[in-house]
Image: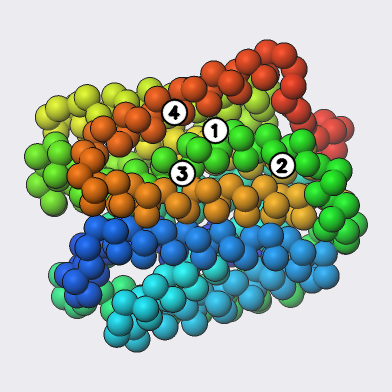
């Protein structure tokens, strides 16, 4: 069986594990009503899903020095199925918090095992394949508000998780069937010393965290509170706000596809810095936008730009890290950056609860991102950031 079928089955799995994280954004309102959650607690539930995604990343990197990548991917599908069933049965805020965390755990472990595997399936087309894989993930973010809305028309929030559990079980079985019949790459067999990878690859790890840590923090809080933000501040109706949230994520679908291809052709660091600048500019523009059409236009640009960061950064890291360090070093980067990113929702929720306006919060964070970007540009100009890049003579694989 060709590697293409394994890749296709992974695209179905990544759709589901990303759905497990982003589904909480459109569910915050019904969950708030069902469990009487205030803004801070609602933000905490969303944060726990992302903290769950952050927590297993470094341990999974160590696990990958002992267990084959595809077996870890298979395990994450089983965890997702169980976590969704747990959420379906949740009857208290603590159970809701645990379930959100477990769903995040499945996604975090999946990305650490799957992204290196994807880059190794087609080593000469890392950006392209990561872009396609990321595009499948992004489709879940687009579908999430529509999926939740459709289920809530005839059922409760619980049925959202029942559907996720059923489809996750099927997708996991599909991946098992294709992987066991395919000759998978053995590049990960050289990655057997987790601490050595950290010591050797720390410049790229630290650079990755510097490039995305603060932006990821702002982005996480922004999209989880987007519906509340535009309804409370911009006078947008809840229905229109949910549609605009779909626009945020929908713009990311072509962003993954196009930027993945650009990342194979352009120098990594300048591309990432340009995208970061676009994210800050569009975030600040949204705080000034008035009227549904202007808000929709800026929202679409912001969604495209911020989602371009993911394939650009992953290509930079996975294209640069050698076989013997790839999964271990990538897990360190991803675990560190996700811990920072996950805190965005709870911090923004707490600031709003204390009386700060959404626009003021986002403008302040935008100013901070400008300062960080200026430092990164200066470091790049001084040639102090590792550019990376895999040996271009590596073949593209099957």
Q: State the mark number for residue 368.
A: 4
Contact, CB < 8 Å: mark 3 with mark 1? no
Q: CA distance from mark 1 to mark 4?
A: 25 Å
Decide: few, some or many residues near mark 1? Use Cα within 10 Å; few <14, some 14-19, many ≥20. Answer: many
For numbered disc 2, what is the local secondary structure? Answer: helix
Please name which of the two marks, 3 or 4, marks the residue nearer to the observer.
4
In primary-sequence order, the first of circles 3 and 1 is: 3
- In the figure, is residue 159 to the left or right of 262? left
For numbered disc 3, what is the local secondary structure? Answer: helix
Contact, CB < 8 Å: mark 2 with mark 4? no
Residue tagged 1: 259
Q: Please name the residue shown 60% across and 23% down the image.
A: 376
The colour scheme used to paint the residues is rainbow
In primary-sequence order, the first of circles 2 and 1 is: 2
For numbered disc 1, what is the local secondary structure? Answer: helix
Q: Position of residue 332 (x, y in %)?
A: 70, 52
Q: CA distance from mark 3 to mark 1?
A: 21 Å
């Amino acid at each position: 069986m060709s590697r293409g079928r394994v890749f296709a089955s992974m695209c179905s799995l990544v759709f589901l594990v990303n759905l497990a994280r982003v589904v909480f954004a459109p569910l915050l309102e019904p969950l708030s009503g069902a469990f009487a959650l205030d803004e801070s607690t609602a933000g905490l539930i969303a944060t726990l899903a992302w903290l769950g995604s952050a927590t297993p990343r470094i341990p999974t990197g160590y696990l990958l020095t002992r267990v084959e990548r595809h077996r870890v991917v298979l395990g994450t599908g089983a965890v997702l199925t169980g976590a969704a069933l747990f959420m379906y049965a949740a009857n208290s805020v603590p159970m809701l918090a645990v379930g959100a965390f477990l769903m995040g755990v499945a996604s975090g472990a999946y990305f650490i095992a799957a992204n290196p595997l994807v880059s190794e399936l087609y080593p000469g087309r890392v950006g392209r394949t990561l872009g396609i894989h990321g595009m499948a993930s992004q489709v879940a973010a687009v579908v999430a508000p529509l999926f939740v809305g459709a289920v809530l028309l005839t059922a409760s929030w619980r049925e959202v998780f029942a559907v996720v559990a059923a489809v996750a079980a099927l997708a996991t079985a599909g991946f098992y069937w294709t992987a066991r019949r395919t000759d998978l790459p053995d590049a990960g067999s050289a990655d057997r010393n987790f601490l050595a990878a950290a010591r050797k690859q720390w410049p790229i790890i630290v650079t990755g965290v510097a490039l995305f840590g603060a932006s990821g923090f702002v982005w996480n809080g922004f999209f989880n509170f987007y519906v509340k933000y535009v309804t409370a501040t911009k006078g947008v109706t809840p229905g229109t706000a949910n549609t605009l949230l779909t626009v945020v994520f929908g713009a990311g679908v072509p962003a993954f596809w196009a930027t993945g291809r650009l990342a194979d052709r352009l120098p990594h660091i300048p591309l990432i810095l340009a995208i970061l600048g676009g994210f800050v500019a569009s975030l600040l523009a949204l705080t000034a936008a008035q009227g549904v059409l202007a808000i929709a236009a800026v929202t679409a640009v912001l969604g495209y730009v911020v989602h371009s960061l993911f394939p650009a950064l992953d290509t930079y890291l996975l294209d640069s890290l050698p076989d013997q360090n790839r999964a271990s070093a990538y897990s360190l980067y991803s675990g560190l950056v996700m811990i920072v990113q996950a805190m965005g929702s709870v911090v923004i929720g707490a600031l709003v609860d204390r009386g700060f306006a959404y626009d003021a919060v986002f403008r302040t964070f935008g100013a901070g991102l400008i300062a960080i970007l200026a430092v990164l540009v200066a470091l790049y100009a001084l040639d102090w950031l590792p550019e990376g890049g895999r040996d271009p003579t590596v073949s593209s694989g099957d």
